[in-house]
Amino acid sequence: MSDPPVLFHNKANCSKCAGALELLRASGIEPEVVDITVQPLGAAQLRDIARMTGAPLRALVRTGEAAYAAAGLDDDSSDDALAAAMVAHPELVERPILVHRGRAVVGRPPERVLELFDLG
């Protein structure tokens, strides 16, 4: 039985994503790289990733993006509204996100991506 893939959700030209990917590769981990602007995450995937991080969906939202205000989102927005906006505007998804073996972590700072692996 093969090991499940290490999924690395990122955005091209994101410096934090590049730094996290470099750390993974330097540790001998070659993830399956998925650009969220090319292959956007669906609402169910976003909810699953939030659950895997142990944080609310809101923790995956980039509130400083123009699309956040343009979508009329605020601190009281429902998870449904957040998920719909994140699907429609992938730039709202915090990144990078590493998913492996039913766990996920947001690579902010980039070193956090190594938390999913026993490298000791």
Image (cartoon, rainbow, N blue to C red):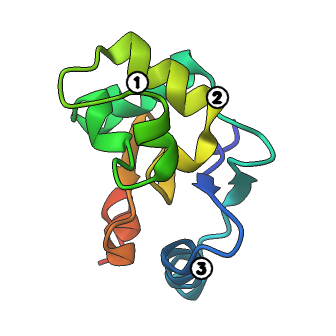
Asked whether disc 2 touches disc 3, contact meaning CB atoms under 8 Å apart, the reply is no
Point 53% across, 19% down: residue? 84
- Identify the disc placed on residue 18: 3
Check disc 3: other Cα within 10 Å, few if <14, some if 14-19, many if 20+: some
- Left or right position of 88 against 116: right
- Determine the image quadrant of residue 48: top left
Q: Where is the N terminus found, in terms of image quarters?
A: top right
Q: CA distance from mark 3 to mark 1?
A: 26 Å
Quarter of the image holding residue 61?
Answer: top left
The residue labelled by disc 1 is 82
Give the CA distance from mark 2 to mark 3: 24 Å
| Type of the residue with mark 2 | Ala
**Circle nearer the N terminus (3, 1):** 3
Describe the element under mark 1 as helix, strand or loop: helix
**Residue at (59%, 79%) from the top-left corner?**
18
Q: Residues within 10 Å of mark 1 (few under 14, many from 20)?
A: many
Q: Quadrant of the C terminus?
A: bottom left
